Structures are given as structure tokens and as C-alpha cells.
Amino acid sequence: MFGTYDIIHPAHIRFLVEARTAANCPNCELVAVISRDSSIERIKGHKPIFNEMDRLKLISGLRVVDYARLGNEGEDYFKVILEVNPDFIVLGYDQISEDQPLFDFIKEHELTTRVYRLPHFESGDVSSSSEVREKVLEICNDKNE
């Protein structure tokens, strides 16, 4: 599974737990692939709050994750699939807006990898890293008034 995991929040934890059960494979390992700083800047247009090594340490420290690693630099972000060779890829609701390039990559490399997409998980009033950022700014602004 791929992700930025910049500000860990309850929806991330639920996503990781659900990813572990989605494939119905009790003996499978959950491998989390952490987006590179350069990829986040290119795709989201801003730097992450935590750098890639800190985000890797955070995700590696979660019990639900068996193994975490950094993704690849640049446009060749699917290359990690060949390196990990997963049985399943679990995507979040907001990952890879167009699935076809992923399916084409899997087919081109004759992989048997299956892809699952999980729904958006609500976790109270903050369900995304951007919502966490907004909440922090709101609290800071309230203190400054």
C-alpha cells in the first residue's frame, strides 16, 4: 500500500487495519510504501511537514505494519511493485485517480497482483492530513486573537 502519511491520524490507522483484512490473507505481510518528498512536492504542490525518513520511522513503528519502505523517486513510481512483488495492492479512496495505468503496469509485467480500493474513512472532525493542518491553524489563530 502506498501513502504520504505526513500527519498520522485515526483515519490512517483505520486504513492500515482495513488494508490488512481487505485481502482476506491472514499470512500476508502488510508493506507500506512511503511517498518520497520530491513526489509529494510534485503531486501536491507543497513540502510535507515531516520529511520522508521521519515518515518512514513513524509508519515502521506501527504494529499493524510489517514492513515499510520508501517509494521510488521521479515518475517511475510503479517500479516499487516489481521490487516488492505484492500479492495485493490496497489503495485509499484518494490514491491514483486513474486506475488504468496501474492495471496496465501489472499486465505489462505479467503480475498476478490484485488491486483493492478502500472507501474514505471518517475519524471524527479530522479525516485527512489537510484537515489536521486546518484544525491546527484554527487553534493557532484562536490563540492569537
Image (cartoon, rainbow, N blue to C red):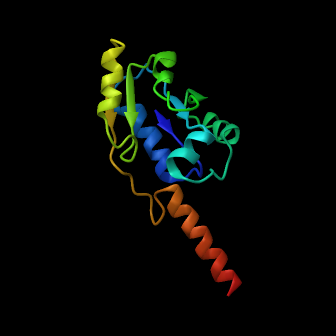
Q: Nearer the viewer, residue 90 or 124?
A: 90
Q: Which residue is drawn at 39% across and 33% down?
A: 90
Report x, y in % for residue 121.
38, 52
Picture residue at 62% right of the left edge, 41% below the top: 37
| Figure disc tally | 0
Q: Where is residue 128 in the image (x, y as percent from the top left)?
A: 48, 56
| Residue 75, percent from left and from top | 50, 32
**Quarter where residue 51 is shown:** top right
- Residue name at image x 55 percent, y 27 percent: 66
Q: Which residue lies furthest to the bottom in this view?
A: 145
Q: In this view, does 138 lie to the left or right of 13?
A: right
Vertical comparison of 135 with 123: above or below: below
Pick the quarter of the image with the C terminus: bottom right
Q: In this view, does 7 lie to the left or right of 90?
A: right
Q: In this view, does 41 lie above or below 19?
A: below
Instruction: Write the residue at 40% across / 57% down.
Output: 122
